[in-house]
């Protein structure tokens, strides 16, 4: 890739991507999803952001790149090995708090917190504790999920879980929802 192409990525993205590939982590968000995450982050000045499922920090880097200087991001993951990659490349950003913990335990312990933007990229906040997670959004807050289109790494029966999740979101009257057949299948919902 040429230097001009690199400039469209967050400054730490290429290094995180290389470390991610070397680690064997295969659940990283794709670049199209990450680009949308960055753009949507720009819509929440002075926002409080939550990422459930840091992984190695690829999507985290894009969210940070879209945030303004007065915004904050809490990013949670239960896999220390992969979270360490995010720490290595992103921990100097004072807007970011990386937390190594179980997502379900963190949600249960922090239900009183409110956020302007939640990217749920793991089971907790998406397939588990959905209602609790959605209640953590401020009015006008964004709830974003990806991997809603069939993926090669899905276990047997996961397709039905994804369909059921979409149906649950569609039934909620307190959210405006857009389902995108793009990238890995993204859903963006806004709390009314």
Image (cartoon, helix red, strand yellow):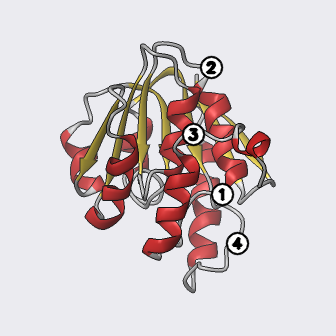
Q: Which residue is mark 3?
A: 62
Residue 125 shows up from this direction: yes
Give the SS element for disc 2.
loop
Badge 1 or badge 3: first in the primary sequence: 1
> Does 156 appear above or below 22?
below
Badge 1 or badge 4: first in the primary sequence: 1
Quadrant of residue 190 in the image? top right
Q: State the image coordinates of residue 134 (x, y, percent, origin top left).
A: 45, 38
Q: CA distance from mark 4 to mark 3?
A: 24 Å
Q: CA distance from mark 1 to mark 3?
A: 11 Å
Residue at figure coordinates x 64%, y 74% from the top left: 159
Badge 4 or badge 3: first in the primary sequence: 3
Q: State the image coordinates of residue 135 (x, y, percent, origin top left).
A: 40, 33
Q: Which residue is mark 2?
A: 43
Badge 3 or badge 2: first in the primary sequence: 2
Q: Which residue is mark 4?
A: 150
Of all residues, the one furthest to the left in this rendering is: 109
């Amino acid at each position: 890739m040429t230097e001009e192409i690199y400039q469209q990525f967050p400054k730490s993205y290429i290094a995180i991507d290389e470390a991610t590939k070397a680690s064997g982590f295969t659940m990283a968000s794709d670049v199209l999803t990450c680009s949308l995450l960055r753009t949507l982050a720009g819509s929440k000045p002075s926002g409080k952001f939550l990422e459930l499922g840091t992984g190695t920090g690829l999507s985290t880097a894009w969210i940070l790149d879209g945030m303004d200087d007065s915004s904050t991001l809490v990013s949670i993951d239960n896999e220390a090995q992969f979270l360490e990659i995010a720490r290595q490349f992103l921990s100097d950003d004072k807007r970011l708090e990386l937390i190594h913990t179980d997502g379900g335990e963190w949600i249960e312990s922090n239900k009183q917190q409110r956020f302007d933007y939640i990217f749920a990229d793991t089971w907790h906040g998406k397939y588990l504790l959905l209602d609790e997670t959605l209640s953590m959004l401020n009015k006008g807050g964004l709830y974003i999920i990806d991997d809603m289109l069939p993926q090669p790494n899905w276990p047997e029966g996961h397709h039905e879980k994804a369909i059921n999740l979409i149906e649950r979101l569609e039934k909620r009257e307190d959210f405006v929802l857009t389902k995108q057949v793009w990238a890995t299948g993204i859903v963006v919902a806004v709390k009314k």
